[in-house]
Image (cartoon, rainbow, N blue to C red):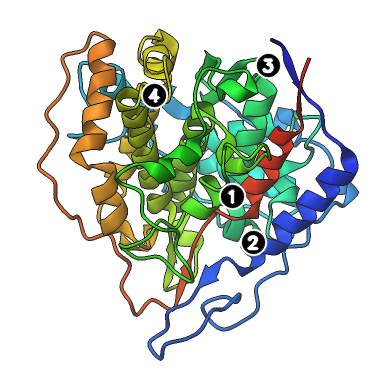
Amino acid sequence: MPRSFRLFASSLSLLISLALGACQGGTLSTARDGGAEDSGASDGSVVDSGVVDASPSDSALPDSSAMDSSLPDSSPDAPPPGPVSGYVDPSCIDGMYSEPLPNLSADIDSIPFVSIRQFVDDVLGARYPAGQFLVRGGLTNESIQNCDELFANGASREGVFDSLGTIVHECGHIYDFVLSSGGTDGFAVTEALTLTGDDGDTVDRFGRTFARSYLNSDEFAVPECVGGSDSSCDFYRNVYLDGDPTNGTFEGGDQGFNSVVEEAYQYVNSLAVAWTYLDQRPPGFATSARDGILTFLWYVGRYLRIARTRTAEFPGVYDFISGSPVWREIILTLWGRAWIYIEATEGMESLAISGDTTFMRATNPAVLDEINRIRLAEGCAGVTPPAASSRRFRAPAHLIRQRLEAPCAHDHLLEDLRANTIHD
C-alpha cells in the first residue's frame, strides 16, 4: 500500500524549535573537583547558542565546479581499507565489506569559514567524503530543508565541529527519506552503495515487523539512565525505545525494524566523524560516539532474537527478515561497516563514555549468535567470535568535559515527522 510523507509547516517549526533547544543541555561534565552539569566548553567559556544561521549566502549548495565529490579509493594516496575484525565473517557479506578509511592527515586548518554550508562541505570533502555525500543528499530533501544549517551549533568553525557528527547523522536520515518511497526504505551507505528493503515497518504501519520498544521486554533490557550513564542503565532507551505500542498513540518506539537499522547506519557515521575530526575538539573532550553504534548493534541482535524466539507474539517476522536476501544484506553490510570503525578506534578512550559496558553488550554471545544465524541463512559458513573481553573504553573520570552526543530531541523530531505518514 503506497505511503507518502505529509509534512505540516507549523508542526515542523515547533518540532525544530524543541529539538534545537533540548540538545543544548546534552552535556555531562565530570571535573576533578566534581563539576556540575555544564553547557560550556572545557575552558569554561560559553559555547555558541546553536541558533541556526539562515543567511542568504548559505541558502544554496556549494559550487559543484569547485568540488570533487568522488570517493578517494582510486587515488594512490587513498587511505587503506579498514582493519579486519574477529567479529565478522571474512567469507560473508559483513567480512567482505570494505571502504577506505577517512583521510585523517588531510589539512583542514587552512579551510576558511565562509558559511556553514561551504565549511561543512569542504571539511567533509577533505577527510570524510562519505559524510559529504550524505549531507549533499540530505540537502535535496524538499520537505526538510537546510539540514546542515538546521543541526549546526552556530555559524562558526567551533560550532560546526561541535555538531558535525550530528549534521552528518541527521542529514543521513533525511537523505534516506528521499530514497524511501511507499513501503520501501532506502539506506545510503556510501556514494558507491545504496541498499533498499521492503515492508520493514510494523504491521500496524503497513509493514511486516513489530515495534522496536518491545526491546524493553526481553531478558537483556536495563532501565533508562537518569542524569548520566553507567553499566546498570541504557542511555539510549528513553529516546529510541519510548512509548507503548498498544496505546494507539504514536511514539518513537512504535517504529519497526527498519528504524532500528536506519539509526544504526547513522551511528556508524557518528563514530566515523567523531574519530576523523577529533583533532579539532578541545582538550579533555570525550564523546559517546562508540557507545551509540555499539548500543544499536546490541539492539539489532536483540530484535532478531525476539523475532526468532517469540513467534507466537510476532508470527512470521523472523521468517520475513531472515528469509529476505535484501534484509540479510542490509543487516550484514551494517554489521561489517560498523566493525570497521569500531576496530579502527579501539582503545581511543575519548570516543566513549561507557565503552566497556556497550562493547560487552554488543558482543554478548546471544547477540553474536543472532548475527551468525543471518550469515547461515545467507549461505555463509559462519564464524566463531573472539572470547569476550573488556577493552578499556571508559573515559577517565578526570576528563573535564564529557559530551553525550545524540540521542536528543533531534531524533524525536524526525520520528515525529514519520508519524505524519499518511497511508493512501
State whether residue 263 appears in this view: yes
The spot of residue 35 in percent (x, y) is 47, 86
Q: Residues within 10 Å of mark 3 (few under 14, many from 20)?
A: some
State whether residue 106 appears in this view: no
The outermost residue toward the bottom is 33
Q: Which residue is mark 3?
A: 181
Drawn side of residue 386 relative to residue 231, left or right:
left
Residue type at mark 4? Ile
The spot of residue 358 in percent (x, y) is 31, 52
Q: Nearer the viewer, mark 2 or mark 1?
A: 2
> What is the spatial separation of the Cα atoms under label 2 and label 1, in whole angstroms?
11 Å
Q: Residue at x 51, y 77 (%)?
A: 42
> What is the spatial separation of the Cα atoms under label 1 and label 4, in whole angstroms?
23 Å
Q: Which residue is mark 1?
A: 166
Q: Which residue is mark 2?
A: 23
Q: Residue at x 38, y 51 (%)?
A: 290
Q: Secondary structure at mark 3?
A: loop
Q: Which residue is mark 4?
A: 331
Tell me where residue 201 sits by quadrant. top right
Looking at the image, do the residues carrying marks 1 and 4 touch, with CB atoms under 8 Å apart?
no
N-term-proximal mark, 1 vs 4: 1
Tell me where residue 7 sits by quadrant. top right
N-term-proximal mark, 3 vs 2: 2
